Amino acid sequence: MEEVPQGCPGTGSAQAGRGASCQGCPNQRLCASGAGAAPDPAIEEIKEKMKTVKHKILVLSGKGGVGKSTFSAHLAHGLAEDENTQVALLDIDICGPSIPKIMGLEGEQFVEDNLGVMSVGFLLSSPDDAVIWRGPKKNGMIKQFLRDVDWGEVDYLIVDTPPGTSDEHLSAVQYLSAARLDGAVIITTPQEVSLQDVRKEINFCHKVKVPIIGVVENMSVFVCPKCKKESQIFPPTTGGAEVMCQDLKIPLLGKVPLDPHIGKSCDKGQSFLMDAPASAAALAYRRIIQRIQEFCGHHQPKEEHLVGS
């Protein structure tokens, strides 16, 4: 995973990409291109385009395979259950665009009248095609998604990102910071090998001044559907997300149990919230979604330029 190096001056600093701690950082060139340079005109263009989008949420993870895209999809499904709420889901996981599959979309861009999706997956001739792009081309694709897509009047824009802290994340922050980004939801699983990378993700958010809405612990426990006994498939050897959030003083939005039906619903392109509405996992999702709604309702993000300012 690409991480924010120790001693990082921050993306908004005049030393971004140029300090001693920047040597060897995978994002050095992108940061250096913004430090002291004229702002990318797309920042203002996207700010203007995003005036019709009320809330913008990044979904992040330190590692792959922790259920980030699954959570993004079900956050969108859950918010869109209110037919008066307009929701958009943007997939910027350029090299691994799984959102079209999870949402049951093949070439279409609308799940429901009030739920639209955009992904590089729609541009591939086959779902098996590899996207082999360097950073600048990824940056251009994200810019195009944010600036050129007709988002319309939207209550929530959910941005599903790739794992880590790489070019895609810096681009998203750069272009959304001036457009009032609400914050980030960070997804993890209970074991220390996942939490270790989540701490780096939290550090990234602090460095680039992205508010942290909270952490979601996926695959928290497995509840046997017959005997209802709980088993820890991924033992929280260091206390799991709960202890980490207490130590770092950030909110734990909730814990989602491991439920095989979630994977089945995603493979079929259906909403797990509709397939198993009374399940423990669905109830956990709904509590988490409610907390995110409450955060967005009370939080007024600062309007500021970060990267490239």
Image (cartoon, rainbow, N blue to C red):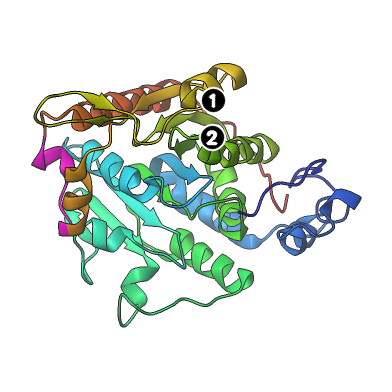
Residue under the image location 65 percent in, 41 percent down: 204
Q: Is residue 278 above or below residue 77?
A: above
Work out how far the residue at label 2 is from the one at label 1, CA to CA, in angstroms: 6 Å
109 left or right, relative to 8: left
Q: Is residue 141 above or below residue 114?
A: below
Q: Is residue 144 above or below residue 84?
A: below
182 left or right, relative to 152: right
As for residue 273 lying within the magenta part, the answer is yes
Report the residue marked by disc 1: 238
Residue under the image location 61 percent in, 59 percent down: 167
* First in residue order: circle 2 vs circle 1: 2
| Tag 2–tag 1 contact (CB < 8 Å) | yes
In this view of the protein, can residue 299 be seen by the observer? no
Report the residue marked by disc 2: 192
As for residue 251 lying within the magenta part, the answer is no
Question: Residue 43, how many percent across, how many down?
Answer: 60, 55
- Specify the amino acid type for callout 2: Glu
Circle 1 crowding by C-alpha within 10 Å: few under 14, some 14–19, many from 20: some
- The span shown in magenta is 268-276
- Specify the amino acid type for callout 1: Thr
Quadrant of the rendered image containing residue 233 = top left
